[in-house]
């Protein structure tokens, strides 16, 4: 028996499913790498929030963070790891499957009224 | 965070470097526009203004990269092997919006230029294939063209070589429409025909429409002349006949496209939020 949409939802990758992390990973999936300022502006997060999310994502191996000096300032560059790219692509595939199974799903024991 | 927001984030990140309209499109548009104004009215105050515009635009082109880097940050675009086009997946949302997860390909600018060249070659071939050519002349007794000062267009039965440099101006103007029109349409198609970029489609269709109108001008004007409604030609002949007007229209289109591209970035990349 296949899983219901609710079971599928419950099994979603929690590392990705958070809205802020989803925004970060979506942005990173569209480029080779982006700097901290760009991620700050595209996600609308505060510096502290973005730092915290990036640290967590780095901890679980979804992103790689590199620091370098540009014009005497530190620039933080972030890229998706191979695992991170797989995770975000897998996440969208799962969401697509959930969408399809939700369209098919009918609650058990509920009678569908006859038309006409 | 809904699907539309994620789609916008994905699109702007993927095309961040191409959407920097203030870098190339706006300065080139300004130069083209001011060139058109100068050609129309070559007085010395305008010459000074033109020189300032060109110098200012070129300086800005060199410095604008820094502005974008400091204001919006930096994105390195993906360069994947040619032909590895990514698949589009639709994500869960009531609207069922589409989101491309993998990013393609070669540098978008290279693709745009490549496809523009192909499209322009097609328009050029179409133009060459039409036997009834419109060329410029100093007037040859065909009344409608006397309405223009100087009279610039005449219908010929077959291809005829221009006699002087000024004879070439309408052809150059119509070629500008073809180049800019195909450039805009190519960008519209390569950017996956997104609704927020519809201005590329509108401007591309208008400019290409003028180029195509130029190709079929002979038969159209002959018909209007026969039908004694040649006065209609007053509306579309000037942009087809005057190079300066073509420069103004193409320059204004570039300027507008650049500003709208920049607005796309500014709309999605929100101002930085302070810590609570």
Image: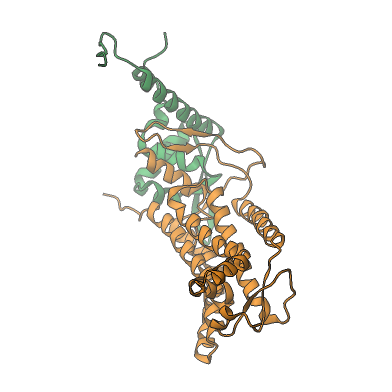
Chain colours: A green, B orange
Q: Is residue B89 left or right of residue A108?
A: right
- Image position, residue B25 (x, y; %): 53, 65
Instruction: Give the answer, above or below, for where B110 lies relative to A103.
Output: below
Q: Quadrant of the N terminus of chain B?
A: top left
Instruction: Give the answer, above or below, for where A112 lies relative to B130.
Output: above
Q: Is residue B186 something that shows in the picture? A: yes
Q: Which is nearer the eye, B251 or B129?
A: B129
Res A104 → quadrant: top left
Q: Which is nearer the eye, A8 or B175?
A: B175
Q: Which is nearer the eye, A81 or A85?
A: A85
Q: Which is nearer the eye, B265 or A29?
A: B265
Residue at point 42%, 35% (across, down): A56
Q: Is residue B228 left or right of residue A16?
A: right
- Image position, residue B11 (x, y; %): 47, 46
Res B215 → quadrant: bottom right
Q: Is residue B104 left or right of residue B126?
A: left
Instruction: Give the answer, above or below, for where A105 lies relative to B83.
Output: above
Residue at point 56%, 70% (across, down): B226
Q: Is residue B55 something that shows in the picture? A: no
Residue at point 36%, 15% (across, down): A4
- Image position, residue B117 (x, y; %): 67, 57
- Image position, residue B154 (x, y; %): 64, 76
Report the number of discs.
0
């Amino acid at each position: 028996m296949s899983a219901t949409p609710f079971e599928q939802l419950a099994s979603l990758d929690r590392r990705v499913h958070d809205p802020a992390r989803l925004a970060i990973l979506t942005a990173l999936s569209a480029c080779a790498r982006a700097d901290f300022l760009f991620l700050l502006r595209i996600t609308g997060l505060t510096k502290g929030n973005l730092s915290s999310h990036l640290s967590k994502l780095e901890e679980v191996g979804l992103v790689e963070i590199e620091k370098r000096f540009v014009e005497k300032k530190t620039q933080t560059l972030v890229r998706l790891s191979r695992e991170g790219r797989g995770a975000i692509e897998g996440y969208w595939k799962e969401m697509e499957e959930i969408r399809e199974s939700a369209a098919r799903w009918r609650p058990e024991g509920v009678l569908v009224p006859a038309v006409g | 965070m809904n699907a539309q927001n994620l789609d916008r984030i994905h699109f702007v990140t993927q095309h961040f470097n191409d959407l920097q309209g203030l870098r190339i499109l706006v300065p080139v548009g300004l130069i083209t526009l001011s060139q058109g104004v100068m050609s129309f009215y070559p007085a010395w105050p305008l010459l000074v203004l033109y020189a300032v515009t060109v110098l200012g635009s070129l300086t800005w082109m060199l410095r604008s990269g820094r502005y974008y880097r400091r204001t919006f940050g930096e994105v390195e675009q993906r360069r994947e092997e040619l032909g590895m086009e990514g698949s589009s997946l639709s994500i869960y949302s009531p609207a069922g919006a589409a989101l491309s997860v993998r990013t393609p390909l070669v540098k978008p600018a290279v693709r745009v230029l490549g496809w523009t060249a192909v499209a322009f070659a097609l328009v050029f071939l179409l133009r060459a294939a039409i036997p009834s050519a419109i060329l410029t002349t100093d007037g040859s007794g065909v009344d409608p063209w006397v309405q223009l000062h100087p009279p610039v267009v005449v219908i010929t039965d077959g291809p005829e070589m221009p006699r002087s440099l000024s004879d070439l101006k309408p052809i150059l103007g119509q070629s500008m429409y073809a180049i800019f029109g195909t450039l805009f349409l190519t960008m519209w198609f390569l950017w996956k025909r997104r609704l927020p970029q519809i201005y590329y489609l509108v401007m591309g269709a208008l400019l290409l429409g003028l180029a195509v109108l130029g190709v079929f001008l002979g038969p159209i004007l002959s018909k209007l002349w026969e039908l004694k409604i040649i006065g209609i030609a007053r509306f579309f002949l000037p942009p087809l006949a005057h190079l300066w007007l073509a420069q103004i229209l193409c320059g204004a289109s570039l300027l507008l496209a650049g500003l709208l591209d920049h607005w796309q970035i500014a709309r999605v990349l929100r101002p930085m939020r302070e810590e609570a």
